[in-house]
Structure formats: C-alpha cells, structure tokens
Amino acid sequence: MIRVGIAGADTAMAGELIRILINHPDVEIVSAFAPGKVGRKVASVHHGLAGECDLDFSPDINPKNLDVIFIDAHSDVADRFRMNTDRWPDLRIIDMSHCPSLDFDALDMAYGLPETNRKQLVRGCRRAVVPRSVAAAAIIGLYPLARHLLLKGDIYVDYACPKDIDTEEKMNMVRQEILYVLNKTQNSFNGNIILRHLDEEVTDRGLKVSIDIPCSLDINEVFKIFDDCYDDHNFTFMLSNSVPGYEVEGTQKTLVTLQKQTADRLTITIIADCRMRGGAGDAVHIMNLLFGLHERTGLYLKAHKF
C-alpha cells in the first residue's frame, strides 16, 4: 500500500483529494495535517466524509512513515517538505498549492501535466507540481500543434471558470505556465498568450477554454495530429461536436472539440472539471504515475446525475 500524508488537509481541494483516496485500492491515508485542527475528525471539516473516513487531524507529519505527501497549504509543516527535499530522498512530494512563487524547475520539481510530461513522471520522478486548471486545459488544446511547430504569433485563450480561480494573480500564473510548456515544446514559438474572460456561466466545477487560431490544415489532418498525441492517454479525448460541461463534472476527463468554421481557422474547445483537472484528480493521476500504477486507478468514471 502507498502510505499517504496530506499537509493542508482542511482545504476544499484536500477534501476532494481525500474523497478519491479513501476509495483508491492502493492507498492508506496515514496523516492529515491542518493548523489548528489537531485531534478533530477530518469528517468534522469535510462533512461529506461522515461514515466514510474515521481519520483524525494529526499534530504533525512524520516523513519516515510515508511514501508520498500531498501539499495544499502554506504552513511551517508544508514548507518543511518543500525546502528540505534532500532529507527524504525516497519521499514523493506532490504540490497542489499553486504557489505563486514556485519555480517549476526549482528543487527538481516536474510539471505534473501527464499529457505533456508523462515520461518524466514515470522515470524516477520524486517531486511534481499540479498544474493550474485553466493552464492545463489550454496546454492540452495547444500542445499537439506545438509538437508539429504549427503555432505562430500571439494566441488568444478565452476561458470561463469559477470566480475563485479567475483572479488577476492566478491568471498571470496561468499565462506563464502556458508559455513555459509551449516554449519548451516549440522553440520557434515567440508569441504571447493573451487570456480573455469568456462571458459564459459555469458551475463551481465548470471549466471551458476556447482557442481560435490560424490553421490551413484539413480537419482530418488536425484530428490525426491530436489522435497521434493523445491516443495512449486515458483521460483526454477528441470530439467533432461541442458537448455541455456537465458531461465531465466529477471526472478526470478532458474533452477537446476540434472544428473548422473556415478553411484557414481552427477552433479548439476544451471542457473539464476544474476541481479535478488542475486539482485533486491530477494529483492522484500524478501519484499513480510516480508509483507505476495504471493511470486510471482510483479515477474510474463515477455515476452522474443528469
């Protein structure tokens, strides 16, 4: 069993993470730390866990008892793991906190988007950061084109997401994340990423990204480029027609719609659950890869009310 600790276990994202992990067949949650909540039941904060989880908030986290720690906090305990990784060379660290000052290349932290970085995650990686949800969706939509050196000029990324994600500071980091991946993938790309709020309502889990870019390729060629890129991935799928966002809520799936309104323009629409992609789902996805498990373990499609 994979022994898990969580630093910042009282956050909403940590609650989502625990809901996944308590049903993960290869996981035992050993420690759940949250400042000021020592001794309380985890279910007293995450009420939906009542009857499912009897874990108490722990006074500290002992890395010697763990195989992996998830970080979703900025406390002394969490920072101890971020800044002293050499002390525990076998401990896997998955940072979910979207810390504004976190440098992806610092401390040997891998950028944890499996669609673009799976090889690094499965080849002895010990530390990874969870991407931001809007960045993850936009990168999934642009990465196959970047691999074929097809991106040029500025790219406008229109997005709709919950208000707690859509802040100036967070969107600035989203832009940097997208540029980080695109520049590493296509060295010749020298454009900018321009983020624009999409005037559409979404639910608290909703995420929609729309990108319209120049592309003279036939739509069948475009589909082949995307299929070749993602055909061996387990959560990203291509469609020819748009679907409503509730189709993916509560799942790890990302659905990408490819359409050509004119011969020289391509519209890419991406929908996902922003609490899973760029959140708890990606964190578990990363853990599965770090420990050599099948990507879908613990993340299978659940029942959904329509």
Image (cartoon, helix red, strand yellow):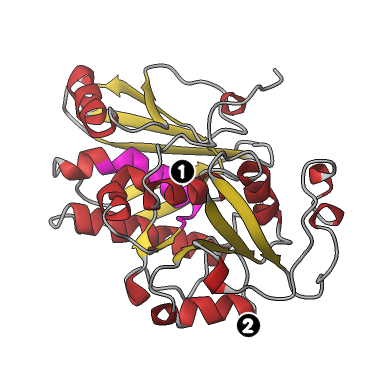
- 156 or 290: nearer the eye? 290
Residue 121 belongs to magenta span: no
State left or right for residue 251 relative to residue 259: right
> Can you give x and y, in whole percent of width and height, for residue 234 in the image?
39, 31
* Residue displayed at 56% across by 68% down: 65
Nearer the camera: disc 2 or disc 1: 2
**Range of residues picked out in magenta:** 130-143
Query: Based on the displayed image, in which of its 4 quarters is residue 76 positioned?
Result: bottom right
Kindly identify which residue carries mark 2.
76
> Can you give x and y, in whole percent of width and height, for residue 285 in the image?
46, 45
Q: Give the mark, 2 or 1, whose residue is nearer the N terminus.
A: 2
* Residue displayed at 28% across by 30% down: 232
Kindly identify which residue carries mark 1.
158
Residue 285 appears in view: yes
> Can you give x and y, in whole percent of width and height, for residue 119 in the image?
25, 49
- 47 or 91: nearer the eye? 91
Give the secondary structure at mark 1.
Answer: strand
- 244 or 194: nearer the eye? 244
